Amino acid sequence: MATAPHPLDPLSPVEISIAAQVVRDAFSNNSLVFRAITLVEPAKHSLIAYLDAERQCAPLPTAPPRTARVLYYLDKPTQFRELKVNLDERTVFAEKALDGKHAFVDAGEMKKCEKACLDDAGVQEAIKDLDLPKGAVVVCDPWTYSPDGMHDMSRRVMMCFMYMKPHSHGDANHYAFPLDIVIELDDDLKVMGIFKLPTGATDHMVPAEGNLSPFDRRKLHTTSEYHPDLVPERRSTTKPYQVVQPQGPSFKTEGNLVHWEKWRFRVGFNYREGLTIHDASFDGRQVFYRLSCSEMFVPYGDPRTPYPRKAAFDFGNNGAGVNANNLALGCDCLGHIKYFDAYHHTNDGTPIQLPRVICCHEIDDGILWKHTNYRTGNAVVARSRVLVLQTIITVSNYEYIFAFQFTQAAEINYEVRATGILSTNPIDIGDDGGVPYGTVVAPGVMAPYHQHLFALRIDPAIDGHRNSLLVEDSVPMTPTDPANAATRVGYTTTKEYVAHETPLDTDNRTGRVFKIVNENVLNPVTGTPTGYKLVPHYSQMLLADAGSLHAVRSEFAAAPVWVTQHADDELFAAGEYTVQSETGSGIASWIKSRETPRRSVRNEDIVVWHTFGTTHNPRVEDWPVMPVDKMVVTLKPVNFFTRNPALDVPISNQGDNRSVLVDGGAGCCGKPAL
Amino acid sequence: MATAPHPLDPLSPVEISIAAQVVRDAFSNNSLVFRAITLVEPAKHSLIAYLDAERQCAPLPTAPPRTARVLYYLDKPTQFRELKVNLDERTVFAEKALDGKHAFVDAGEMKKCEKACLDDAGVQEAIKDLDLPKGAVVVCDPWTYSPDGMHDMSRRVMMCFMYMKPHSHGDANHYAFPLDIVIELDDDLKVMGIFKLPTGATDHMVPAEGNLSPFDRRKLHTTSEYHPDLVPERRSTTKPYQVVQPQGPSFKTEGNLVHWEKWRFRVGFNYREGLTIHDASFDGRQVFYRLSCSEMFVPYGDPRTPYPRKAAFDFGNNGAGVNANNLALGCDCLGHIKYFDAYHHTNDGTPIQLPRVICCHEIDDGILWKHTNYRTGNAVVARSRVLVLQTIITVSNYEYIFAFQFTQAAEINYEVRATGILSTNPIDIGDDGGVPYGTVVAPGVMAPYHQHLFALRIDPAIDGHRNSLLVEDSVPMTPTDPANAATRVGYTTTKEYVAHETPLDTDNRTGRVFKIVNENVLNPVTGTPTGYKLVPHYSQMLLADAGSLHAVRSEFAAAPVWVTQHADDELFAAGEYTVQSETGSGIASWIKSRETPRRSVRNEDIVVWHTFGTTHNPRVEDWPVMPVDKMVVTLKPVNFFTRNPALDVPISNQGDNRSVLVDGGAGCCGKPAL
């Protein structure tokens, strides 16, 4: 028996089919290409009473209507359209023409672009000019076009970067052999131009014709493979390591609702953001209404044409949901693992399952708290168990591992691991030192400098929905302050409530702390508002000049912290339509649009945004596949509870943990072990 | 059969006994109190050939002589002395009078201070004036004295802060009941003064006599316990979690030598720094000569007398080695665990074992690298195994968990977790909001603001001993640069070699990277010097005014990065003798002492120091025992190898990992699970 969906459940396959059919019925004379059919989450004001009742096990009010948002091409890609479907009434509404905007790139489109490019006679001619080694297989990686002022962006343009595999193994690493050519493809999948990539520090791309040289055989090498078929020599020293939970895991799930230790939250998923967290509470108290990675931007720092066109919004342009990996037992997670499936659809609106896109499991995270009473010698230790909700996405060459980690101490870590394969450009052998925009990682292979900038969207509900953002610095008292003059060791904190929507800077030099607090609820012990603090990941912000299109397009990347008033339709920090965007449409634009009067963020329904990431100037150690680069942001209770919320965690003991004593056993220099 | 010790092995019990006897023989007419008998590590120049031969399994040259450093009181505490003992020849040399310096505080001295304080008639009178509840037990916590200009510091002074337990349970948390009195104790264990602590924002301490009030019964409470006897209600939801390694661990040890994956290093231990790492190499290549936590400083920010006296050098004043916990199987570590014991001695020079002060074990750290070929759908995943060398210290109320974590990708993380119990001061009920120097965590209990500042000493050996420090920033190209003018998205890196000994600042805003490189060894792929980079823990530096004694005493706390030329006797960032130190004797003083000429750090034997930590303005959630606050510093190869050094790690597979599929199972609101 099918139960009614929860208002925050992603669309079911049946609902996707209904939405597609309703739209098809409404446009029966048109040809339709469905780009996205996704849940419209109910407006917050319409859902609060429902969630409150549910959390309190009270009778539920009527759920808001189930609504789908449908993005589609009406007859042709330039007629990009959006509408909403009331799934209960099977009616369409809120139809919008999105002329000049572009849909995200889906897998089907990628494949079509690859084929169109490789099938083109001119491209084949250019490849012939490269005189590739016998047996070589050419591979095409289509990229969305990041505007550089050189094309009319009302037309959809794809950039096809070309690579080679010296043999036909399906999993050979073609990024090890970047070719000198690049192709522009238009929205009719026609080749617009074939160019030679720059090879010197000050070159730019030029038409391929007459400019191509044969592939330099000195670039052939065999040390850039990662697939086990091609890297047969593996260390045998790593012994198996297994996680055993004889009583099963400590979490329970019911549909998309997860209970673990004192946490209760709902898992969401959509084609764009992938994993989302909703209505998180701890020990019955509301903490966060919604948590998500809102966007990410990966701009490359090489100013030579066409490289400024490499600047990807992996969420807005590609989608974290549709690019989520199908996780596998014992590979992506270890221990007792619960998977969540998701659903998407084909371009004709047929639902498809995305199996195992989220995994849920526990890890042991070492010691949670310990104290030894030195007088009695008695040590008391509690170990930290952490619940991980993880999703992994592949965006062409790169992988990102996103995880929300819930702790018994009522903290949430948002961890991002970057891995996968570096994007590469060709570089002439012998010109290795001459190009200041990247690192040579193999013969003829340059991995260009770039940034990864993530926007974590934090929609708090600290003891309810009226919250404030308090900025605290730790500051020395002055030597002339009479209270401090004698020893000059005193310090206090400055406390400033943010009044209006604004960007804010982090500052480790002042020990700056961002507290999201509820001024209406005072902690009975400390007498201060209950709160959670944001422990930022200190990062360099966007390096591109403020006047560049990169900066215009990625507004969130200008500052590490932003606060806005909540708005249901402001989910994406760089705006709704990031593909080929040329004007500001994200977080700074929203704030600017309401400058008179400025919107208050004090004791309001607010959203806090954290921009973080890494300036990734590649190491050769990141090649041919990159050991994870970890980034962690933490949300931590600060005077929210009346004491350590993990005080009642079971005391660690050998009876439960069954650890094993090890002794020595090495032999050195061929001698037997002692 | 006893084998000869390795030159870096800590002193054996036999050697400790020999050293003590040699000193006793040399001073047969004096009474001796041994404060420390510890290994003098051989001078680096005398050890390099030995370690090189050992690493290469070549015949070993003669080992340098085994030498002990002995710190002792000659007849009385004011006659603090040091000398060295040649253990092979049983001779003493390098005798030094340390008049005006003070030995670290050991457990025996702590106990004597407690007893002397509690036995004092005046103290007992003052306690009577407090009119404590019936059955209360008074507890005394002695603290070293951080100079505040109010006493002659050639005399050793202890501050005894006083607490109460409302009942006699040995593990009741006395920090929950700080009393209003504090006692000054001199080096003859005589009470010098009894004072009432300040209670208002602008008070200072005053003589106790006539100023004490009865203990305020409103401060009595039962919610500040952590021991399981006293917190019987524990959650039962946390299911057991076990680590099984059917083929045993992947590491091997031989004495203090550890082999794990491609790492090889030697474990050291001394009474002061505790755990040290020596001669670390990866895949046969030298990386670090010595790694250690050199010092830590915990200054409190409350300027009211006597609180400026609370500022602890937990390593120099107390010792990380002698305060190391005796770790227990299944509590402090999980899985297959190898323990290392250490040895110290009593004040009369009798060796004592410090059992299980270091644990060595593996953890699974999630995904190490992954790539999915979106064309074939083939995913390749390697999981990250990490080797942890951990030690935990208790310094009165606080615990610190120090761990060197070695990764398969040739990284080393240095992780510090702060836990334990907050230091507390009394505060009047009702005066909670009035004191700006702390957080009220329970009735009448204020946890004052303070900092934890750690000095990680990194003695590198990147492909040998001549290293340089390269500072790289990522900087935007200017909009007027012709190469950048068209799109303004370009950026490059600035590279500056540090010429002379100096402090340096971190800067996340410029993406600053500190690379320790060997300019004599070029990476064959990148053409750049081989190196390791320091990924700092971004922290606020010392808040106390530069003119304060806190600042004078903790020179390393003024800047996050320092570089010096290596000197065998410069191990401790705040100097050798931190107890009651009043003048600079640490890293800044060393640099200043050789300003003409300044010492080069380019292509020299250098040491890099990283100061990091936390400004800890307590949360009530840190009470009564604090969930760990984690800090991580990473040392990461950067163009040291020719590719990902973890490329050959076994591919993750269910056959080895034996994970278990979980399904649902929650019931909500009393309804059965779906």
Image (tube, coloured by chain):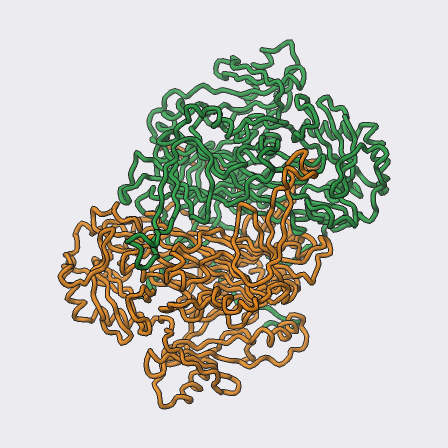
Chain colours: A green, B orange
Choose top left, top right, bottom left or bottom right for residue A669.
bottom right
Rendered view: B621 above or below B562: above
Q: Give the total number of marks visible in the rendering.
A: 0
Task: Please give left or right for residue B194 compared with residue B564 in the image.
Answer: left
Is residue A39 or residue B547 the one in the foreground? Answer: B547
Task: Please give left or right for residue B204 compared with residue A36 in the image.
Answer: left
Q: Residue at x 63, y 49 (%)?
A: B494
Rendered view: A472 above or below A585: below
Q: Residue at x 40, y 68 (%)?
A: B583
Choose top left, top right, bottom left or bottom right for residue A151.
top right
Residue B520 position in % (x across, y down): 69, 63
**Which quadrant, please, contains the C terminus of chain B?**
top left
Residue B403 position in % (x across, y down): 49, 59
Question: Among all residues in the image, which is located at the extreme top?
Answer: A29
**Which quadrant, please, contains the N terminus of chain B?**
bottom right
Task: Please give left or right for residue A597 compared with residue A487 in the image.
Answer: right
Residue B84 position in % (x across, y down): 47, 81
Is residue A284 or residue B75 the one in the foreground? Answer: B75
Rendered view: A37 above or below B367: above
* Res B112 visible: yes
Q: Residue at x 44, y 39 (%)?
A: A252
Residue B153 position in % (x across, y down): 32, 71
* Res B361 visible: no
